[in-house]
């Protein structure tokens, strides 16, 4: 549990930082790109207003002093590399002005112009060139091209630099969190370990007086015969003993440092054994118990925990199935995993309860649970047993009138026994 808490802490911090950095990079990149387009379109507008040439910039800025131009620079004509192509609507080249650019010749300019004419757009990018289409009154078309290669290269460098710096920052933060998260969760780990040890120690301490009380009640019953008070004490002692054993089991399964024994356990035999043991109670309660258990499935793990897992799932299905209900246990080996499923019909179970079924002391129906004598620990023990074997457990319902609990165990722990 502490390891999962540490992992979630690191994951939450890294994801939060990633999304923040990504949002900042996206905003900066979009704003920078839009500024490039805005500046280019403003230069093209100046050229379009002056037949493809720059006017006297000093007079131009003086006459347009009220505009919100970002390009108030007398050096603008000398900083801009551009060319123009004039052609008819049919695509016949009339004239090209290549005097203000060296990287493009007349043939390339003509290809650019014809490509723009085919696209039928009045503005946009073609390669590194921003263009603007100007229609004249004599059915001639003038296309202005402005070289934005330098600014686009700077923009790409900015995006790449931000990406590399952000990735390096994420890696640095990850390493720091990997180091610091251990110290952050250390108090919780110590507290969890103290609680686990307390439950285990207290459970073992309680088992002795409970055993003595149970033995004394048997002696009293033998001396004085059965009566209401002795029976009540025996029943409550039995419940306390069961609760104590369940808490000790949970504490043992929660101990993350304990490695699973390397013994090979026949999961098929355990399922068959549990299936047979519940046939009698099912018949007594007039419920239908069926099983589809594939033979020869084995797993390396804790036999006691696996036995208790299957028993808990069947016991839970038996307790909470409706009168005359159906219960099915299925064990099969799939391509990548082993799947154990226990299905039962029930009077009603809300989908809202499913996510809490494996919580400790959680009971979906207090009145119903008082009848069955449960503590809300059975499925918690099952979940802990599955977790200790590196598996997954889940609950689902199709119609809120049935419950299906599915256990998946990873393939690397599983082996098939020869038939």
Image: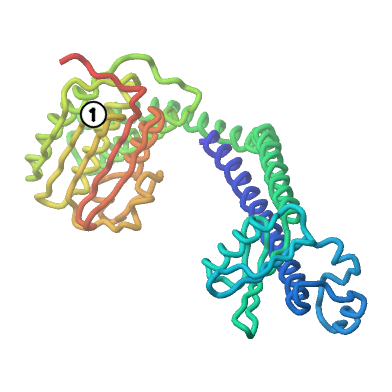
Q: Quadrant of residue 66?
A: bottom right
The quadrant holding residue 93 is bottom right
- The answer to whether residue 166 is above or below residue 88 is above
- Crowding around mark 1 (Cα neighbors within 10 Å: few <14, some 14 to 19, many 20+) is many
Secondary element at tag 1: strand
Point 19% across, 56% down: residue? 347
* Foreground of the two, 158 or 11: 158
Q: Position of residue 314 (x, y in %)?
A: 21, 38
Res. 35 visible in picture: no
Q: Please tell me which residue is depicted at 70% across the width and 39% down the height of the picture.
A: 168
In this rendering, would 290 be left or right of 64? left
Q: According to the image, what is the colour scheme of the structure? A: rainbow
According to the image, label 1 marks what residue? 333
Q: Residue at x 35, y 22 (%)?
A: 413
The percent position of residue 116, horizontal first and vertical second, equals: 58, 65
Residue 203 location, quadrant = top left
In the image: residue 88, left or right of residue 361: right
């Amino acid at each position: 549990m502490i390891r999962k808490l540490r992992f979630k802490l690191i994951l939450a911090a890294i994801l939060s930082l990633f999304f923040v950095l990504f949002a900042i990079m996206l905003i900066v990149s979009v704003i920078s790109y839009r500024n490039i387009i805005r500046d280019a379109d403003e230069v093209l507008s100046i050229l379009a207003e002056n037949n493809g040439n720059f006017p006297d910039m000093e007079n131009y800025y003086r006459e347009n002093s009220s505009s919100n131009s970002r390009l108030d620079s007398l050096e603008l004509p000398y900083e801009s590399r551009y060319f123009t192509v004039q052609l008819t609507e049919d695509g016949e080249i009339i004239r090209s002005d290549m005097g203000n650019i060296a990287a493009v010749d007349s043939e390339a300019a003509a290809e650019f112009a014809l490509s723009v004419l085919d696209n039928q757009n009045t503005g946009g990018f073609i390669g590194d060139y921003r263009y603007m289409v100007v229609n004249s009154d004599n059915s001639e078309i003038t296309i202005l091209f402005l070289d934005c290669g330098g600014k686009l290269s700077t923009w790409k460098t900015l995006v790449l630099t931000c990406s590399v710096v952000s990735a390096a920052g994420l890696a640095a933060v990850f390493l720091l969190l990997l180091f610091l998260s251990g110290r952050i969760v250390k108090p919780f780990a110590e507290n969890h370990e103290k609680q686990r040890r307390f439950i285990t120690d207290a459970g073992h301490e309680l088992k002795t007086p409970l055993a003595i009380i149970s033995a004394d009640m048997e002696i009293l019953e033998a001396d004085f015969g059965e009566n209401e008070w002795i029976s009540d004490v025996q029943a409550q002692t039995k419940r306390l003993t069961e609760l104590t054993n369940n808490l000790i089991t949970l504490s043992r399964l929660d101990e993350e440092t304990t490695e699973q024994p390397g013994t090979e356990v026949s999961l098929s035999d355990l399922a068959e054994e549990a299936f047979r043991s519940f046939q009698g109670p099912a018949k007594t309660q007039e419920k239908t118990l069926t099983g589809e258990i594939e033979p020869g499935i084995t797993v390396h793990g804790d036999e006691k925990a696996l036995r208790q897992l299957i028993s808990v799932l069947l016991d839970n299905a038996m307790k909470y199935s409706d009168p005359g209900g159906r219960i099915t246990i299925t064990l099969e080996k799939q391509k990548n995993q082993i799947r154990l499923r226990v299905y039962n019909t029930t009077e009603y179970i809300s989908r809202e309860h499913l996510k809490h079924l494996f919580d400790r002391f959680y009971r979906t129906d207090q009145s119903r649970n008082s009848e069955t004598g449960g503590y809300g620990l059975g499925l918690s023990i099952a979940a802990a047993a599955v977790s200790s074997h590196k598996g997954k457990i889940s609950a689902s319902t199709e119609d809120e009138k049935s419950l299906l609990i599915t256990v998946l165990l990873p393939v690397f722990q599983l082996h098939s026994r020869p038939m």
